[in-house]
Amino acid sequence: MVVVMQERASEEQIEKVVAHLVGLKMDVHRSTGVSRTVLGAVGDDRHLDPRLLEMLDGVSEVMQVTEPYKLASRAFKPEGTVVSLGEVRIGGDEVIVMAGPCSAETEEQVNAAAAAVKKAGAKILRGGAFKPRSSPYSFQGLGEDGLRMLRAAANEHDLKLVSEVMDVSQIGLIETYCDMFQVGARNMQNYTLLKELGRQRKPVLLKRGIAATIEEWLLSAEYILAGGNGGVVLCERGIRTFENYTRNTLDISAIPVVKKLSHLPIVVDPSHGTGRRDKVAPMARAAVAAGADGLIIEVHCDPDRALSDGAQSMFPSQFDRLMAELRIIAPAIGRTICLEPVMRRGWSQGER
Ligand code: PEP
Ligand code: MN
């Protein structure tokens, strides 16, 4: 149930409605928009008569949210959510690019990748220290040593940091070193993990499960939101279909669908979405053109020797070119994208 307050509703009127809903054993989540306050009431609303709520002073409209997710729904928050990592804002006008290696391997490798992606205009460094690998014999990540390398490189190059948390026991470590938790595709339905992340303050990048419907994905986001953490960014990273030329099938249509159903920002991972380096740029361009709020891309300075996902990791020069292309696409759909200082100085003077 969503209660939309009138534009000029007083704080006292809002509090009375909240108290009324709490009295009916509902959990109330408040969202203060530009012009009005919206109250999302979650719980068993079978015996709640919307007409009685509409009679309360200051109430404009009461809506039954028919979708099973409530707090993630557009009805609860008509304007889009902006998720902030310090001054980096995901969901605003600017398309935010996160980039870096699949895994942290060595200090030099992480540092070189961070330098390259920063130079091209990325705002957030990505890199795994705990890796969910299909085979138990594959490289599993460097754990805390990897996080230390990633944090040092992010600081050195003035980037924010996102890294994957695979298990509740790793939350403390990831929280210490990173600006954002990444929940991988394999963990989208790890509800114990999602509930615990709901109690955290730092934002969460929630990847879509390999066989998850959009509704299941939004319900996973709902777990985090219901726990009190409003900083959820969705990430489309490809789903499993019968097609096996590409590693996954990147569902670009999920972008406009999510934009309609939810207020949460959505970013796209064309690296895992395609599994092939040469297909990353076209899909990244398509994602931005389709309205994605950002991208997360694997970049490695020596991808053929990468310990994980080398085939889909871009060379820095490819990433650089992609960023230049995105600077043409983003404004065409009313978005901006970082003009990194080096580019601003050199690009128009034929440096590239
Ligand atoms: C990754 O980002 O390296 C990763 C393992 O992603 P996903 O969970 O989408 O497979
Ligand atoms: Mn990877």
Image (cartoon, rainbow, N blue to C red):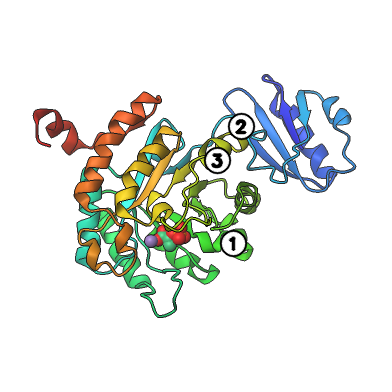
Vertical placement of 50 versus 296: above or below? Answer: above
For the residue labelled by badge 2, is the local secondary structure a helix, a strand or a loop? Answer: strand
Residue identified by numbered label 2: 32
Residue 110 - label: none
Disc 1 residue lies near ligand 1 with CB under 8 A? no
Between 115 and 325, the residue placed more toward the observer is 325
- x, y percent for residue 125: 32, 53
- Circle 1 Cα neighbour tier, 10 Å, few/some/many (<14 / 14–19 / ≥20): some
- x, y percent for residue 81: 53, 36
What residue is at 19 percent from the left and 48 percent from the top? Answer: 317
Amino acid at the residue labelled 2: Thr
Q: Is residue 49 left or right of residue 289?
A: right
Q: Earlier in the sequence, mark 3 or mark 2?
A: 2
What residue is at 14 percent from the left and 28 percent from the top? Answer: 348
Amino acid at the residue labelled 1: Glu
Q: CA distance from mark 3 to mark 2?
A: 15 Å
